[in-house]
Image: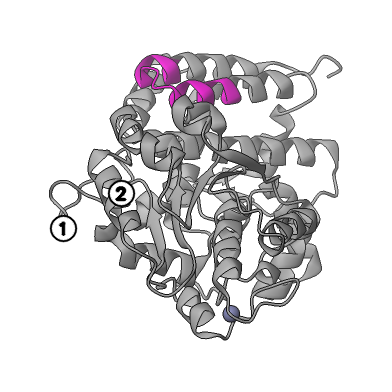
């Protein structure tokens, strides 16, 4: 389907973030590597890519002052994400192939595929979808903790350091975290824990307090734009439009560029939702709510985020006649240019707030039927609100 061009994970392959890269490199060159760090950056940021680049730089046998060499035996293994001293843990769930006690090593081939053949900026939803469990919760559980402890008890094979990259520690449950506290606090010699998270709010406090936080901001529009033109060969204008739409989230930008079935599903849900909303069809909205309630939590969040993008895009169209949209104007028999005027100065803020609040509550396990029905009724009222100066 998609031809991605992510071949290696050197610092130079990650757009922007120059100050952070420099700081990270400095800690290695000055031998001030903290053994337990949290790379904290929003979804679609460079947090995972930086964690890998950092670990690769630490292990590189021929590094320069600014990057790994990319060619020494250590770098070659890193390029394949197959260095024996590089370990990963990430949320997983049981599948048809892995019927019980799923742990990260069962999915390592999928993990390498996603990073190498696509890109390292993907969201949790992208990952769960990749391993075909998007309707489940991914978890880092106690079986995983046992695997982590086991991996770190071995001596490093080839490098000075062993690295354990724990992606999305937000999904680590309390008993898994408890099992790891001791090893995080006092890891075996020359062990590096790199936690890679979107939000510190949902990380178990006892783990959080044992890490040193490295804050990674969202990419700028310019970073995304440059990345898309240089690595994906699209025009400056197209790249500029996508970057505006993606709000610093590179995963989202790539989804816009390579539209997939998932956004078609979102488009259909959205179109139905708006039609029912305009008609104030409560019975229809209840049915719609039933449907979305059956989807997994990540899929629900993904839908809300999709809706926010369309609303933002509509607002841009309302504001400027000449605005050329990146979203296909017609989807599901729906004409975005006809919808856009219903989004205006007098309802946009309330709509944003309602969607953001819903996303917040989905994250916190609110009852989806109540939440989405409530939201639907609210949105139905808001889109029918007339602009004050009309
Ligand atoms: Zn190297």
Could you say which is closer to the camera, residue 26 or residue 321? 26
Q: Residue at x 55, y 14 (%)?
A: 378
Is residue 98 within the magenta segment? no
Tell me: residue 57, above or below residue 87.
below
Q: How many marks?
A: 2
| Label 1: which secondary element | loop
Ligand 1 visible in quadrant: bottom right
Say left or right for 378 vs 219: left
Range of the magenta residues?
355-373
Residue 224, by quadrant, is bottom right
Say left or right for 125 vs 351: left
Q: Residues within 10 Å of mark 1 (few under 14, many from 20)?
A: few
Is the CB of mark 2 within 8 Å of ligand 1?
A: no
- Chief secondary structure of the magenta portion: helix
In percent of width and height, residue 369 lies at 35, 18
Is residue 366 within the magenta segment? yes
Tell me: residue 283, above or below residue 246.
above
Query: What residue did someone put label 1 on?
Result: 97
Q: Residues within 10 Å of mark 2 (few under 14, many from 20)?
A: some
Residue 25, by quadrant, is bottom right
- The way the protein has been coloured in the rendering is one colour
Distance from disc 1 to disc 2, alpha carbons, whole Å, reads 25 Å
In percent of width and height, residue 201 lies at 54, 27
Q: Report if residue 111 is visible in the image.
A: yes
Could you say which is closer to the camera, residue 314 or residue 185? 185
Q: Give the mark toward the camera: 1 or 2.
A: 2
Tell me: residue 107, above or below residue 389.
below
In percent of width and height, residue 42 lies at 61, 42
Tell me: residue 255, above or below residue 318.
below
Query: What residue did someone put label 2 on?
Result: 149
């Amino acid at each position: 389907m998609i031809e991605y061009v992510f071949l290696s994970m050197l610092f130079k392959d990650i757009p922007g973030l120059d100050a952070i890269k420099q700081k990270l490199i400095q800690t290695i060159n000055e031998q001030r590597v903290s053994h337990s760090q949290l790379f904290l950056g929003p979804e679609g940021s460079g947090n995972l890519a930086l964690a890998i680049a950092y670990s690769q730089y630490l292990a590189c046998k021929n590094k320069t002052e600014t990057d790994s060499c990319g060619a020494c035996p250590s770098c070659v293994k890193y390029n394949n994400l197959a260095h024996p001293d590089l370990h990963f843990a990430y949320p997983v769930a049981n599948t048809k192939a892995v019927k019980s006690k799923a742990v990260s090593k069962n999915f390592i081939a999928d993990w390498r595929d996603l990073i190498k053949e696509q890109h390292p900026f993907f969201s949790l939803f992208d990952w769960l979808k990749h391993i075909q469990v998007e309707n489940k919760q991914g978890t880092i559980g106690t079986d995983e903790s046992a695997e982590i402890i086991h991996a770190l008890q071995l001596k490093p094979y080839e490098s000075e350091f062993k690295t354990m990259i724990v992606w999305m520690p937000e999904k680590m449950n309390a008993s898994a975290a408890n099992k790891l506290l001791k090893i995080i606090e006092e890891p075996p010699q020359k062990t590096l824990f790199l936690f890679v998270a979107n939000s510190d709010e949902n990380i178990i406090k006892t783990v959080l307090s044992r890490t040193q936080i490295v804050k990674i901001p969202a990419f700028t529009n310019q970073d995304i734009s440059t990345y898309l033109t240089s690595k994906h060969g699209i025009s400056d204008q197209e790249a500029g439009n996508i970057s505006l739409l993606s709000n610093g989230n590179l995963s989202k930008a790539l989804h816009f560029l390579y539209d997939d079935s998932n956004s078609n599903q979102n488009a259909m849900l959205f179109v139905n939702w708006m039609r029912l909303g305009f008609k104030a069809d409560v019975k229809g909205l209840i049915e719609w709510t039933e449907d979305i309630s059956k989807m997994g939590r990540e899929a629900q969040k993904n839908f809300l985020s999709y809706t926010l993008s369309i609303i933002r895009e509509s607002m841009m169209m309302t504001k400027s006649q000449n605005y050329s949209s990146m979203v296909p104007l017609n989807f599901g028999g729906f004409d975005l240019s006809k919808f856009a005027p219903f989004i205006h100065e007098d309802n946009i803020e309330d709509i944003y707030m309602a969607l953001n609040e819903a996303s917040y509550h989905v994250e916190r396990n609110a009852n989806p039927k109540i939440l989405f029905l409530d939201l639907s009724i609210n949105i139905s009222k808001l889109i029918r609100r007339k602009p004050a100066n009309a």
